[in-house]
Image: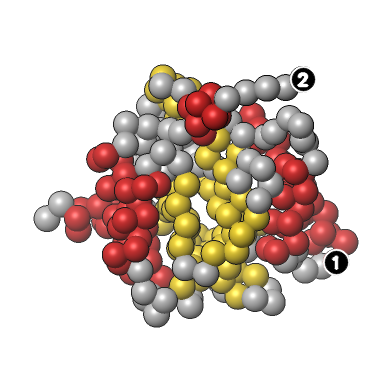
Amino acid sequence: MFTTSNDKINRLMTGTTTVGIVVNDGVVLATDRRVTAGYYIAHRKKGVKIWKIDNHVAATMSGAVADLQKVLDALTTTAMQYKVETGKPISIRALANYASLIIFSSRPYIYLVHMIFGGWDPDEGPVIYMLDFFGTLTRETEFMATGSGSPTAFGVLEDGYRKDMSIEDAVRLAVRAVRSAIYHDPGSGEGIDVVTITKEGYREVNAEPYLKELIR
């Protein structure tokens, strides 16, 4: 019988900061780049923690790398198959629900994954969902953060978020939230990756100009 402790799960789930913000014009996803294994820094170059599923949807990654890759590979394949068969992109709600079913159906074992799905839905516009390692799925109307740096990130997001902010201001806020987490959380570091997903599609954003604004 599979048994574990909350301490073991928490140790595996820590070591990152991911942020998702939804505004009227689209969605912003941002993460740090440090890769950890428990308390060990496993990678100091560039750990990519934003996974492009399709041109209209992506997910942030927090948790066990192999588990994340397995789930996200399945979602990417499903999105591609749906587009081939129907000629249109899969809805983000359907994709997030499918991910929830994958994770929930693995019980009594669990996938150590914690993800933020975000994108521009063909029917609903900009949306983000949060999925945890029990398969719990919630739609977030403003913002979400995961990982060991999330308490600090939440403080910045709570202070700076406005529903009517522009996509550029949302990028600026996401960068500030992740940067603050990096300063206070030893499990986060090595730089920041940012993407935006709007009606025009998926776009990677250079975080450096926004970081320079913060250190003037």
Seen from the viewer's position, the closer of residues 32 and 155 is: 155
Quarter of the rendering containing residue 112? top right
Does the image show residue 159? yes
Residue at coordinates 53% horizontally, 24% vertically from top-left? 8
Instruction: Provide the residue designation for mark 1.
Output: 86
Label 1 and label 2: CA atoms lie apart by 42 Å
Q: Residue 33 location, x and y as percent?
A: 41, 37
Seen from the viewer's position, the closer of residues 71 and 148 is: 148
Amino acid type, label 1: Thr
Q: Residue 6 location, x and y as percent?
A: 54, 29
Q: Quadrant of the C terminus?
A: bottom left
Numbered disc 2: secondary structure? loop
Amino acid type, label 2: Met
Which label sits on residue 1? 2
Residue at coordinates 53% horizontally, 48% vertically from top-left? 60
Seen from the viewer's position, the closer of residues 162 and 82 is: 162
Q: Residue farthest to the right?
A: 85
